[in-house]
């Protein structure tokens, strides 16, 4: 099968012929139909986050079950699924206390000594975050997929695989935004737009979208933003304080920078919470002004929207089909696998919401 392989940090992905194994116990072979290009893929491509190489990147996808291994009862060939990197074991402390997105059980991957899921002529290729979606097939643990209804278009379903689950989940699960809250979202890429949309669904009375690219701010309005702040023109902290008379209840950072994480903390009012979604590079420290903690301000991280994805993803599909989630507007381009390096270049400009790779 064709797959996009990262062999060296900061080098283009190479489209190579890679082999996948047969599904073993509890494994599912999925034919990839669509895969979104998320900024997190870029963080691993450029080394901001290290990963064992060579690796097939990609982690935001949807497809059709091709074959299942022993003991798989959840899906059968022909079922439509969304993948999720938050594969869960179901019996660790995190899983049993309802925090499945924090599960790190090693059993979701094949054990050392077993044949690898991905290989090229005998050379093992690493699987990325339990998935490796930039490939025509994915061989995954059955706990890395959610089954969805048949009438959901799979190019838009792919977006739910990471960006939507992350952005909406940060709002409704991690931060538990109450109806009537005032919310600010810094960064209007796929993840930030999903957070804006999630805030609107949660009943936020004000949703302030912040970006540096005017077209992204306009797009944010479609997703439910009530106010727009161009951070290239004004100080976003001051702008949010003025718009809200002292600060928002919830700020979300959806970029992955020290400066914007600090802005998120500064723009929440007394008792408010800043939730950092962006992947801040390894080694970077985030600073806050200590006395602001006396105002009971909180700073927290959010991983994959604190999801329970087998419950969440079918609900997000329903939201889309009811017109509440704006996935059509999130797709900036439909591209081929060979265009993946161009999609990475576009991500750096901030101009795109999501490029989606189509495999058919
Ligand atoms: N926590 C998680 O589980 C999780 C999951 C998925 C993605 N992420 C991370 O979320 C972040 C966003 O991902 P994405 O795919 O939406 O990225 P993206 O590149 O599509 O969007 C980033 C947006 O931020 C804007 N921006 C850049 N610098 C800015 C600044 N200084 N001020 C205001 N706006 C600015 C850009 O114009 C762009 O619109 C990334 O760091 C990604 O790795 C985290
Ligand atoms: Zn992602
Ligand atoms: Zn677990």
Image (spheres, rainbow, N blue to C red):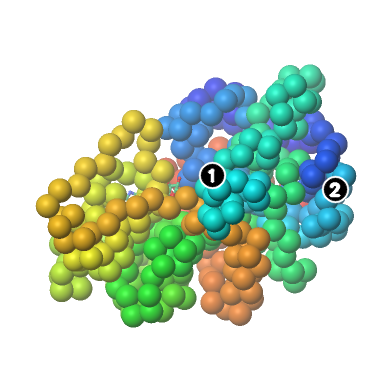
Mark found first going from the N terminus, 2 or 1: 2
Q: In this image, 25 relative to 143: left or right?
A: right
Percent of width and height locating residue 38:
52, 48
The residue at which mark 2 appears reads as 71
Of the pair 202 and 55, the residue shown nearer to us: 202
Which residue: 77% across, 68% down?
150
Which residue: 77% across, 60% down?
80
Q: Quadrant of the N terminus?
A: top right
Image-quadrant location for residue 233: bottom left
Percent of width and height locating residue 321:
64, 76
Q: Is residue 356 visible?
A: no
Which residue: 23% across, 59% down?
297
Q: As displayed, is residue 16 above or below residue 304? A: above
**Does the Cβ of the disc 2 residue fall within 8 Å of ligand 3?**
no
Percent of width and height locating residue 245:
15, 74
Q: As displayed, is residue 173 above or below residue 52? A: below
Which residue: 38% across, 50% down?
301
Residue 343 numbered tag: 1
The kind of secondary structure element at disc 2 is: loop
Q: CA distance from mark 2 to mark 1?
A: 38 Å
CB contact under 8 Å: marks 2 and 1: no
Residue 193 numbered tag: none
Q: Is residue 81 visible?
A: yes
Percent of width and height locating residue 277:
40, 52
The kind of secondary structure element at disc 1 is: helix
Q: As displayed, is residue 130 above or below residue 183? A: above
Disc 2 packing (10 Å; few <14; some 14–19; many ≥20): few
**Which dot, 2 or 1, sits closer to the camera?**
2
Q: In this image, 102 relative to 209: left or right?
A: right
Disc 1 packing (10 Å; few <14; some 14–19; many ≥20): many
């Amino acid at each position: 099968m064709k797959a996009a392989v990262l062999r060296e940090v900061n080098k283009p992905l190479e489209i190579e012929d890679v082999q996948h194994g047969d599904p073993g116990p509890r494994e599912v072979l999925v034919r990839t139909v669509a895969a979104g290009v998320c900024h997190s893929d870029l963080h691993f491509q450029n080394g901001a986050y290290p990963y064992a190489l060579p690796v097939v990147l990609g982690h935001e996808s949807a497809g059709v079950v091709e074959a299942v291994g022993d003991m798989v009862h959840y899906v059968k060939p022909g079922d439509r699924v969304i993948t999720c990197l938050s594969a869960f074991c179901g019996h660790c402390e995190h899983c049993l206390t309802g925090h499945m997105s924090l599960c790190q059980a090693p059993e979701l991957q094949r054990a050392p000594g077993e044949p690898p899921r991905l290989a090229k002529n005998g050379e093992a290729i690493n699987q990325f975050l339990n998935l490796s979606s930039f490939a025509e097939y994915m061989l995954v643990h059955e706990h890395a997929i959610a089954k969805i209804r048949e009438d959901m278009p799979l190019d838009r379903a792919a977006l739910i695989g990471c960006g939507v689950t992350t952005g909406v989940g940060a709002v409704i699960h991690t931060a538990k935004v109450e109806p009537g809250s005032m919310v600010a979202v810094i960064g209007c890429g796929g993840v930030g737009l999903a957070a804006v949309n999630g805030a609107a669904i949660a009943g936020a009375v004000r949703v302030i979208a912040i970006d540096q690219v005017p077209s992204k701010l306009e797009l944010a309005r479609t997703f439910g933003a009530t106010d727009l702040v161009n951070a290239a023109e004004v100080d976003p902290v001051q702008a949010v304080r003025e718009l809200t008379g002292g600060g928002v209840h919830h700020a979300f950072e959806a970029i992955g920078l020290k400066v914007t994480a600090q802005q998120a903390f500064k723009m929440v009012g007394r008792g408010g919470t800043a939730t950092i979604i962006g992947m801040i590079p390894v080694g970077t420290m985030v600073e806050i002004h200590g006395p602001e903690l006396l105002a009971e301000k909180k700073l927290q991280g959010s991983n994959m929207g604190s999801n329970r994805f087998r419950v969440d993803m079918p609900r997000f599909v329903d939201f889309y089909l009811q017109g509440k989630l704006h996935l059509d507007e999130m797709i900036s381009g439909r591209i081929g696998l060979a265009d993946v390096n161009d999609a990475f270049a576009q991500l750096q400009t901030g101009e795109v919401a999501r490029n989606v790779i189509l495999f058919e």
